[in-house]
Image (cartoon, rainbow, N blue to C red):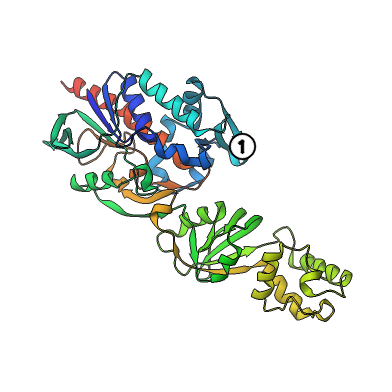
Amino acid sequence: MRVAVIGGGAAGQIAAIRAAQNGHAVTLFEQNEKLGKKLFITGKGRCNLTNASDRDGFFRNVVHNPRFLYSAYAAFDSDAIVALIEAAGTPTKVERGRRVFPASDKSSDVLKALEKTVRQAGVAIRLHTRVSEILTGGGSVTGVRIGQTAEPFDAVVLATGGLSYPSTGSTGDGLRFAQKLGHSVQPPCGALVPLETEETWCRELSGMTLKNVTLTAYRGKKEVYSELGEMLFTHFGVSGPLVLSCSSLIADAPEGTVLKIDLKPGLSEEQLDARLLRDLSQNVKKTLSGALYGLLPQRLLTQVLTQAGLDGQSPAAQFSKAQRKALVDTLKGLTLHVSGARPIAEAIITRGGVDVREVNPSTMESRLVHNLFFAGEVLDVDAFTGGFNLQIAWSTGALAGSSIKEKENEIQYCH
């Protein structure tokens, strides 16, 4: 069969590899000047290519529509992508949180391994080529249109990504193609995205990283997220791993979410109060800020005292029990109010996409158009940080590419 794969990212490349390995004539269309442009910047340029957690660990980290991915993950799991990358000459390593990276810490090595495998499989790569339309007839794929030219294909894998990182070529074309072919598309928005806050004092701490803190998010009185880790202040609010993960759970309507930061999660309120008493008693002749200099970085301490309604220049000797209580409460629950999420262009991934109810989870084939397959971020599935979203791309792409042969066999068998 002649197979067109639209999109040369993670999902598209693995789909092309699998389809070509099954004997199909595969053409991979990529509008950029090279394959895997978004892959190149993932993991801060190191490419967190998957997560080495077990099956249950993977599905615990899928935020939306995890059940849809059961067959895909079974067909091509984290061990499978590691084996493929290493077989192409790129060793990997496992770091904190079971995150998998190339041993060289260079995303370019993952890209080289992928492209090497794509070429070895015999895939025809067409760069600088933008597909403008998927052609159909009789309820089935018939080809694609490039500019004014129609090119015949028997099957198409749509792996164009979402809308995040538009500089890498994420234009939303795939969502438009799907809609034109009758598919429902869940409205796209940013997930794994920094959050803006009503409080403007965050900008005074811009660039400051908080490590080993607990971030808890509330919608009304309901706790929707709580985790220990790292975050940072920005000129618009907050970002960092904890915030990005939290954003995935509130992405649909982030406004009004209340964030509380426990700056001293290792200490109970009683232990923290004892710590304050000790520091104050040892520095009775100093100002409050001076007495507590070892508690937090100075910029952060100044802001925490302000949020607690305290004057850092007041004498430490006059610090009352009620004031200690106010400070302890602030240290254990520094409060921020979310006013919104940053634009989707700044998101790591896209929430929303092709409605998975209209896609066969056993094959990734459209339930509406024969021989049309979906893979990767174009689908309405997303996960937390840590390599899980790339694993979704690998798994759905591999299943889509493999399923084309299964469909062909069914047709031959029927005849």
Q: Quadrant location of residue 292? A: bottom right
Q: Is residue 146 above or below residue 242?
A: above
Q: How many marks?
A: 1
Does 391 sit left or right of 20 as displayed? Answer: right
Q: Is residue 238 above or below residue 125?
A: below
Q: Confirm whether residue 72 shows in the render.
A: no
Outermost left residue: 138
Residue 281 on image: x %, y %: 88, 72
Q: Confirm whether residue 409 shows in the render.
A: yes
Name the residue beneath numbered marker 1.
95
Does 5 sit left or right of 182 as displayed? Answer: right
Which residue is at a point 51% across and 56% down the rendered structure image? 246
Q: Quadrant of the C terminus?
A: top left
Q: Is residue 164 above or below residue 314?
A: above
48 vs 369, nearest the viewer: 48
Residue 135 on image: x %, y %: 15, 37
Number of other residues with Cα within 10 Å of mark 1, as a class: few under 14, some 14 to 19, many 20 or more = few
